[in-house]
């Protein structure tokens, strides 16, 4: 679709003021840092909960795998609601579900209780307090030339939450025990409710040539690059959630103290701040698909070096630094491609569909890790799968175009 000067002026006038956009970015960053920071520490609870109840690691792993699946399956719907009614209402409701889920997880004493709390409620809560909903609001609030950097800033805030809250989670766990620690985390999660209530996100006004929701879905479904982006994000989910949940157990099995596991996850969060911001900044003037290809190749090389070299505390910390630089750097680039190709009118919903594939990968990574560990007693096979998938993702992204689609004047898809 050719954009006329008057259309550009109308689009610019529809953007919030600079002050309003900055406030949205700050509040959105607080929400996403809280949601991601709390979630990043769930792996620390696998060993104490499994030991207390006599579960195999498969029970805990299945609950978190279901969490990622529910998160992904509900994400297109929460994204569509945010596109239609604004992100604030979605964040408030989802924040409440997240807090209740943590409280119930702290009181859980059965596999069913873990499934309902850690799996379903927290999964629903995450769908409305993380990337697709908040980055959709940011994409609507800033101009296209600043969009990639703004998404990088908010994504980096999620990384900061992982770094800042993980030591606190470990401290609560050691001080209070796993049950009371989860109750305290539920109280922290409740802070997302007022953050969301004060966030002012105005959905993009409908224009005469805007795509309807149905047409937007049909348009995306007809684009090969959209499905390649989805498959690439599947790989990202598989890798990062497998590492986040199972790395502490992997290190413990190899004789390293539990403090090393928490420290390396904190390093992931710390260096992810820099990596995510840098990726968002670079995406403003370098091809986002090519950047993603290189990110996946380097990620595969880092995982291979960690797995096949002798394991030590030092090598583990190096791995945390290196993988942290690559951890969520895919997020602003992936969402930026969606915004560049399809526009921002249905960004949260379309980004939610891409994120669904991320969560399908997350489900496979965390569940397969627990299943194969219980079956074989080690994680070697899953590490090898993660390395191979890096190569697949790099190849997929190399052939994706981020050029905006040319649309017909009516709502019937693309030329």
Image (cartoon, rainbow, N blue to C red):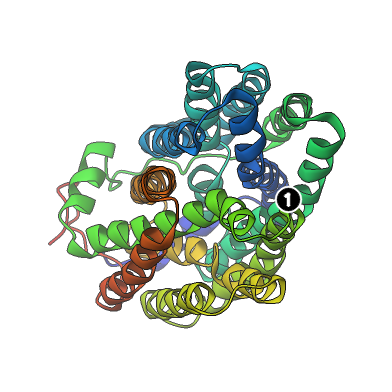
The image shows residue 185, relative to residue 257, as above or below, that is above
Residue 328 x, y percent position in the rendering: 54, 62
Judge left or right: residue 19 versus residue 254: right
> What kind of element bears circle 1?
helix
Residue 338 visible in the current orientation: no
Q: Residue at x 77, y 26 (%)?
A: 187
Judge left or right: residue 80 versus residue 37: left
**Mark 1 Cα shell of 10 Å, populated few (<14), some (14-19), many (≥20):** some
Residue 312 x, y percent position in the rendering: 66, 73
Q: Residue at x 67, y 33 (%)?
A: 196
From the image, tell me which residue sits under label 1: 26
The image shows residue 296, relative to residue 337, as above or below, that is below
Residue 198 x, y percent position in the rendering: 72, 33
Q: Residue at x 32, y 67 (%)?
A: 389
Residue 7 position by quadrant: bottom left
Q: Residue at x 38, y 40 (%)?
A: 206
Residue 31 x, y percent position in the rendering: 68, 41
In the image as oriented, which residue stretches furthest toward the right?
175
The image shows residue 382, relative to residue 393, as above or below, that is above
Front position in the image: 94 or 362:
362
Residue 293 visible in the current orientation: yes
Residue 396 position by quadrant: bottom left
């Amino acid at each position: 679709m050719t954009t006329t000067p008057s259309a550009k002026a109308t689009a610019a006038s529809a953007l919030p003021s600079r002050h309003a956009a900055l406030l949205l970015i700050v509040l959105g960053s607080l929400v996403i840092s809280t949601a991601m920071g709390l979630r990043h520490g769930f792996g620390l609870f696998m060993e104490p909960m499994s030991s207390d109840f006599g579960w195999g690691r498969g029970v805990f792993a299945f609950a978190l795998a279901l969490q990622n699946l529910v998160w992904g399956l509900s994400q297109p719907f929460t994204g569509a609601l945010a596109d239609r009614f604004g992100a604030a209402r979605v964040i408030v409701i989802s924040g409440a579900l997240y807090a209740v889920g943590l409280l119930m997880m702290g009181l859980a004493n059965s596999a069913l209780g873990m499934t309902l709390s850690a799996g379903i409620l927290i999964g629903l809560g995450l769908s409305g307090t993380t990337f697709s909903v908040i980055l959709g609001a940011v994409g609507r609030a800033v101009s296209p030339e600043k969009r990639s950097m703004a998404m990088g800033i908010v994504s980096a805030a999620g990384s900061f939450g992982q770094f800042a809250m993980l030591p606190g989670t470990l401290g609560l766990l050691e001080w209070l025990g796993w049950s009371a620690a989860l109750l305290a985390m539920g109280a922290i999660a409740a802070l997302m409710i007022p953050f969301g209530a004060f966030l002012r996100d105005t959905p993009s006004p409908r224009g005469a040539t805007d795509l309807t929701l149905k047409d937007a879905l049909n348009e995306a479904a007809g684009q090969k690059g959209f499905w390649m982006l989805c498959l690439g994000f599947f790989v990202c989910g598989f890798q990062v959630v497998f590492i986040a949940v199972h790395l502490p157990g992997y290190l413990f099995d190899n004789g390293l103290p539990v403090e090393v596991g928490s420290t390396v996850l904190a390093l992931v969060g710390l260096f992810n701040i820099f990596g995510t911001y840098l990726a968002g900044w670079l995406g403003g003037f370098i091809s986002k698909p090519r950047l993603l290809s290189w990110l996946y190749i380097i990620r595969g090389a880092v995982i291979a070096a960690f797995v096949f070299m002798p394991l030590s505390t030092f090598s583990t910390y190096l791995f945390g630094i290196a993988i942290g630089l690559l951890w969520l750097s895919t997020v602003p680039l992936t969402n930026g491609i969606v915004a560049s190709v399809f526009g921002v009118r249905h960004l949260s919903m379309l980004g939610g569909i891409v994120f669904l594939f991320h969560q399908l990968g997350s489900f496979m990574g965390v569940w397969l890790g627990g299943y194969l560990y219980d079956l074989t007693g080690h994680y070697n096979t899953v590490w090898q799968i993660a390395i191979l998938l890096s190569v697949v993702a790099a190849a997929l992204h190399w052939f994706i175009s981020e050029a905006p689609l040319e649309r017909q004047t009516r709502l019937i898809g693309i030329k």
